[in-house]
Amino acid sequence: MPAQSTLTPEQELTAKAMAEKLFKYNRDIEEHATIFRQDPNKYAEAYVEYLKLNPNSASLPAPEDRDTCVADCEKTLAKPCENLLEHIHAYTSAMLLCRLLPQTLPHDVYMRAIELRTELEKANPLVVDPKALLGISVTGELHPLLVAELTKLNPAPVPREMEPDSVDYPPMMAVADSEMFSWDDFPSTAQNVTPEQIAAWKQDPEQTMNQFFVSDETGEKEAFKVVSVMTMKTETAFYLLNADEDEAYSWSSRHFFEMLSTAELRGTPEE
């Protein structure tokens, strides 16, 4: 069972409110990202226009400007989006809120908020429009911005064969900064993944959510965690986020469990 919270009732309420906000903003991020995947070239064109506006969404505001920044971001998210440029503004506003708001909390309250947000995610799984699972196609040549970005991607987790007639899930998804991690804060306690654990995860794939693993399938040790699980009909895709990365890649169920058969589970799973 999870450890009992040692927070005061007031801190618990603060953590709950933050969890609800982080859940909403992370869901906003994925919903806007789904729009971008529908036509990558048009998204790239809109993003170039966005950059011309000299956005400061990558920079955190000074403490005295924090409240104004939060209000501006929430106002942007509340407006219906009528074009891709507005979707980009909303997406970056949600990303900035996920980076900014946790800094307003003590560490123990923030960690409790993350626990509660995870519970919300499990209770309210992301429902994806089947049309969004038909794969990403680009007519003509890739936009130069996409070519530049694709050359930066680490190809190690991507190679995999899709099953015949399988659902083509989106190959990647953006993640909020709060999901990112590095080797420095990676759990040190390790145990080999057992056949019994794999059997249990096959029965209930969502048990793998937020679990940390280490695999040397590519020839060197790779640290990753499961940030999303999508199931359609009888097929499941696992989205794995590597250490120091900001995008998660999809793995078919078969290849994911093949990799886990020789992997380590880091940290102690909840019992």
Image (cartoon, rainbow, N blue to C red):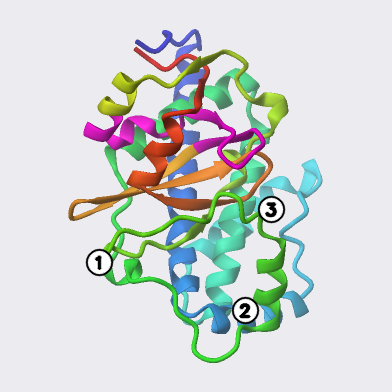
User: Quick one: SS at disc 2?
Assistant: helix
The quadrant of the rendering that contains the N terminus is top left
Which labelled disc corresponds to residue 165? Answer: 1
User: Marks 3 and 2, Cα distance to the nearest angstrom?
Assistant: 29 Å
Q: Which residue is mark 2?
A: 44
Residue closest to the far front? 219
Residue 113 belongs to the span the image colors magenta:
no
> Which quarter of the picture shows residue 91?
bottom right
Give me the residue at 63% from left, 59% from top: 72
Left or right: residue 57 compared with residue 123? right
User: Marks 1 and 2, Cα distance to the nearest angstrom?
Assistant: 30 Å
Magenta segment, which residues? 201-225
Q: Amino acid at mark 1?
A: Asp
Q: Are marks 1 and 3 in contact (CB under 8 Å)?
A: no
Give me the residue at 63% from left, 25% from top: 186
Q: Which of labels 1 and 2 is toward the front?
A: 1
User: Quick one: SS at disc 1?
Assistant: loop
Q: Which residue is mark 3?
A: 68
Q: Which of labels 3 and 2 is toward the front?
A: 2
In percent of width and height, residue 209 lies at 40, 34
Q: Which of labels 1 and 3 is toward the front?
A: 1
Q: Is residue 35 among the parts visible in the rendering?
A: yes
Give me the residue at 72% from left, 72% from top: 148
Q: Nearer the viewer, residue 60 or 211?
A: 211
User: Marks 1 and 3, Cα distance to the nearest angstrom?
Assistant: 50 Å
Residue count near mark 1 (Cα–Cα under 10 Å), binned few <14, some 14–19, many ≥20: few
